[in-house]
Image (tube, rainbow, N blue to C red):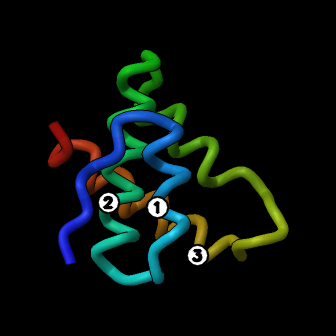
């Protein structure tokens, strides 16, 4: 299924109505990058947030996600 890249927080929230799939996760990451850039945030800002301690992800998974965000950052226009 095709998911457009979200351009607002409302569009990001709307993704929660779909079943989780690789395509949905990719759209969410691309949307997060698009929204963060529009708000003037840098890749370093986003990676810092991803790497922050939380109760959802372990350190290894947070690092992996940070690497995914870094790879996607240059691909999302």
Residue at 32% across / 66% down in the picture? 26
Residue 56: give x, y in percent of width and height: 76, 71
Disc 1 element: helix
- Which of pointers 2 and 1 lies earlier in the amino acid sequence? 1
Residue 73: give x, y in percent of width and height: 28, 44
| Label placed on residue 61 | 3
Residue 18: give x, y in percent of width and height: 45, 74
Q: Looking at the image, do the residues carrying marks 2 and 1 touch, with CB atoms under 8 Å apart? A: yes
Residue at the disc numbered 2: 27
| Label placed on residue 15 | 1
3D distance between C-alphas at marks 2 and 1:
9 Å
| Location of residue 7 by image quarter | top left
47 or 28, nearer to the observer = 28
Callout 3 environment at 10 Å: few (<14), some (14 to 19), or many (20+)? few
Residue at 40% across / 61% down in the picture? 67
| Label placed on residue 7 | none
2 or 23, nearer to the observer = 2
| Location of residue 59 by image quarter | bottom right
- Which of pointers 3 and 1 lies earlier in the amino acid sequence? 1
Residue ranking furthest to the top: 40
Left/right placement of residue 33 relative to residue 41 reads left
Q: Looking at the image, do the residues carrying marks 3 and 1 touch, with CB atoms under 8 Å apart? A: no
| Nearer the camera: disc 3 or disc 1 | 1
């Amino acid at each position: 299924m095709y998911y457009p890249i979200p351009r607002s927080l409302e569009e990001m929230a709307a993704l929660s109505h779909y079943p989780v799939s690789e395509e949905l996760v990719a759209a969410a990451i691309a949307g997060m990058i698009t929204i963060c850039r529009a708000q003037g945030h840098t890749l370093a800002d986003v990676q810092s947030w991803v790497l922050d301690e939380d109760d959802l992800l372990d350190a290894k998974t947070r690092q992996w996600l940070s690497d995914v965000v870094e790879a996607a950052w240059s691909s999302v226009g």
